[in-house]
Image: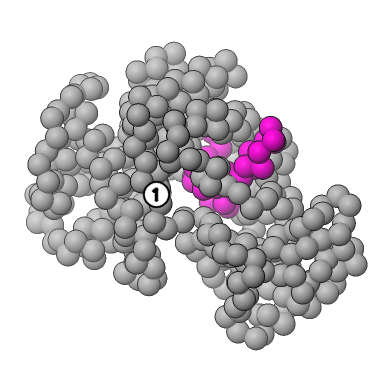
Amino acid sequence: MNVQTPPSAPLASTAPTDTSPLQWPDPQRQAQCAAWLAGLQERFGLAPHSLRLASADASFRRYLRLDCAHPDFAPSLVVMDAPPDKENSAPFVQVAKLMQEAGVHSPQVLDWDAEHGFLLLTDLGPHTMMQRIDPSAAPPLAAYLDAVDTLIRWQQASRPGVLPLYDKTLLCSEMALFSQWYLGAYRQVSLDEAQSRVLDKAFDTIAQENLSWPCVYVHCDFMPRNLMDKGRNQPLGVLDFQDALYGPITYDIASLVRDAFISWDEGFCLDVVVRYWQSARAAGLPVGDDFGAFYRGVEWMGLQRHLRIAGIFARLSLRDGKPRYLADTPRFIGYIRATCARYRELGPLLRLIDQVEGTTPPPLFVFGRG
């Protein structure tokens, strides 16, 4: 049995109709885009008048689709609209190249107007893996195994010193978003000295556990909304990779099975993680020889991610005026409480969260006493 809650707010994409009028923040930016596309029109067989919204995400980026008559790219290409005063597109360009080199199906950067923040990209289609999932059907194991294959291909290409390091400072600063934005700004909780010590110790313990795992390339948001599915035995495409880092191998598989917008039962998640672990070992990736230890690592990595995202979603609502994201925070609190209930070291964090949420502690099934 699967447990799925339809997502209330997309993290990386929305699906407006192609007939939706295209809105621009100001006429100057519209003119800049038009001038840039005019210079590419003949080379790529573009139809600039067909420009329409394809998707938008939680940042200041958005994606536009336009018709294309070029024989290699027809019927359409995608424009990334990323204002350079708000978004740095250089990481996207770098990681796109790395993914191409790794044999991962991802957008190819055909042109980049760095001055104005426009990129012309190959089009991976309009449908995400998430959109292909039928809530009334059994969990889509085949689709998740395709995602596992894609993830392993990406991880096999890993090299140190290429992407920024996902270090302890970053891990802890991300968890601090939970304290600042979820507890402080959203829940209006002022922690006393003892509670602050509980959080600080928990964050330090979580970071140490996560950093005990070897590093690979980390997408940082590897989930069905960022995987494009063309069907017909086509490889999954990967989007929204501009925040990629070099960090714990447990991160992306945790993102896949503990999704920001969809929840599956424990049995299905275990099945996917076991299959990933088996394939990763066969591929020579550093996932260890003990699946129990690896699954613990996945859960603790997921815990760090869920603390971070709960803080980010509160910030998106309170600071950025996007209240729809808060509708999904109960999912993260549920993930956090379930993981904390399994491990003795996380008991104080669980009690603190239950105090804040007014919830009753779940039965303790303690794993990993060491």
User: In the depicted view, which residue is nearer to us: 331 or 201?
Assistant: 331
On screen, residue 321 above or below 6:
below
Residue 330 in picture, x, y percent from top left: 27, 50
Q: Which residue is mark 1?
A: 6
Q: Is residue 240 magenta?
A: yes
Q: Is residue 205 magenta?
A: no
On screen, residue 80 above or below 207:
below
Mark 1 crowd level (few <14, some 14–19, many ≥20, 10 Å Cα): few
Give the residue drawn at x 68%, y 54%. 93
| Res. 117 in view | no
| Res. 242 in view | yes
Q: Is residue 226 left or right of residue 212?
A: right
User: In the depicted view, which residue is nearer to us: 80 or 272?
Assistant: 272
Bounds of the magenta segment:
216-243
| Magenta stretch, overall SS | loop
Q: Is residue 261 left or right of residue 196?
A: right
Give the residue drawn at x 82%, y 52%. 73
